[in-house]
Image (spheres, grey):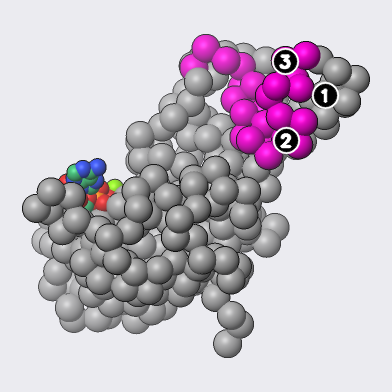
Amino acid sequence: MAPALLSARGLAKTFGGVVAVADVTFDVPAGEIRAIIGPNGAGKTTIFNLITGIFPLDRGEISFRDHGLNGLSTWQRAQLGIARTFQNLQIFTNMTVLENAMVGRHRQSRAGLLAAAFRTPGSRREEARIREHALACLGVVGLEARRDDPAGSLPFGQQRLLEIARCLATEPTLLLLDEPAAGLNLAETDALGRLILSLRRRGITILLVEHLMDLVMGISDSVLVLNYGQVLAQGSPEAVQNNPAVIEAYLGAEVADA
Ligand SMILES: Nc1ncnc2c1ncn2[C@@H]1O[C@H](COP(=O)(O)OP(=O)(O)O)[C@@H](O)[C@H]1O
Ligand SMILES: [Mg+2]
């Protein structure tokens, strides 16, 4: 088997008395779309926060491209190639669509914001490169034509795409998507599924937290099921859907609700 791009071992995180993540171990091979599913409060977003370094781990280890992540800042992790979107959309609504996409790229910029402020010739060239690259990322999600509009004027579904474009501008190896289909209509959800598949074809590995089972089961190579901060099952979409423990804990409840 190919070596894992991301390897998580014995992850644990407690908030006050609440055990958000109890003991979670999994690998993400390069080039996969790996879904993480589970009921509300199962610990999915916390795992994203642990991978991106928003919170330190209580216990456990995460390695990415053979770098141990413990002790690295969110910024250092982004530099290594980890990008994420947020469950609650984080868009600068007063900035243009293009400026929003460029924010992602500025994080990677060599000249940095200080040089940009002085507008040296080098920083102007860098700025032009950043703009061109951000435009290309807007093209990937189909938002090029909206580049000069205020981001806040986009319909909600397109704001979600803009957040993905901003991630792409950092040239991620691993992209974490936290409920990207929340609030999208059926057509937008289909388009999102095709976009995620196209990102995999570009060589980006995807970790997908999502409630929408049609989307998850339709595009994922493998699925990790969390329940109360622990791994309940993992495997192919078919194996997970037929796992009695999963049906009982999670999918069964969905079917019963339907
Ligand atoms: N920053 C935080 N402070 C306190 N409790 C938190 C925090 N983040 C998550 N939790 C708690 O951890 C548990 C898991 O939350 P979360 O990872 O957001 O679940 P999910 O994304 O699967 O719905 C929940 O009980 C939640 O209330
Ligand atoms: Mg969540």
The residue lying furthest to the bottom in this view is 1
What residue does disc 1 label? 123
Q: Three-letter amino acid code at disc 2? A: Ser
Q: Three-letter amino acid code at disc 1? A: Ser
Please state, as top left, top right, bottom left or bottom right, where the N terminus lies in the image: bottom right
Q: Nearer the viewer, residue 92 or 9?
A: 9
Tell me which label, 3 or 1, sits earlier in the chain.
Answer: 3
* Residue 215 visible in rendering: no
As for residue 76 lying within the magenta part, the answer is no
The residue lying furthest to the front in this view is 71
Dot 2, how many residues are within 10 Å of its Cα: few (below 14), some (14-19), or many (20+)? some
The answer to whether marks 3 and 2 mark residues whose Cβ atoms lie closer than 8 Å is: no
Secondary-structure class at tag 2? loop
The residue segment tinted magenta is: 93-118
Magenta span dominant secondary structure: helix
The answer to whether 96 is drawn above or below residue 110 in the figure is above
What residue does disc 3 label? 117
Spatial separation of the CA atoms under disc 2 and disc 1: 10 Å
**Picture coordinates of residue 150, whole percent (x, y):** 57, 13
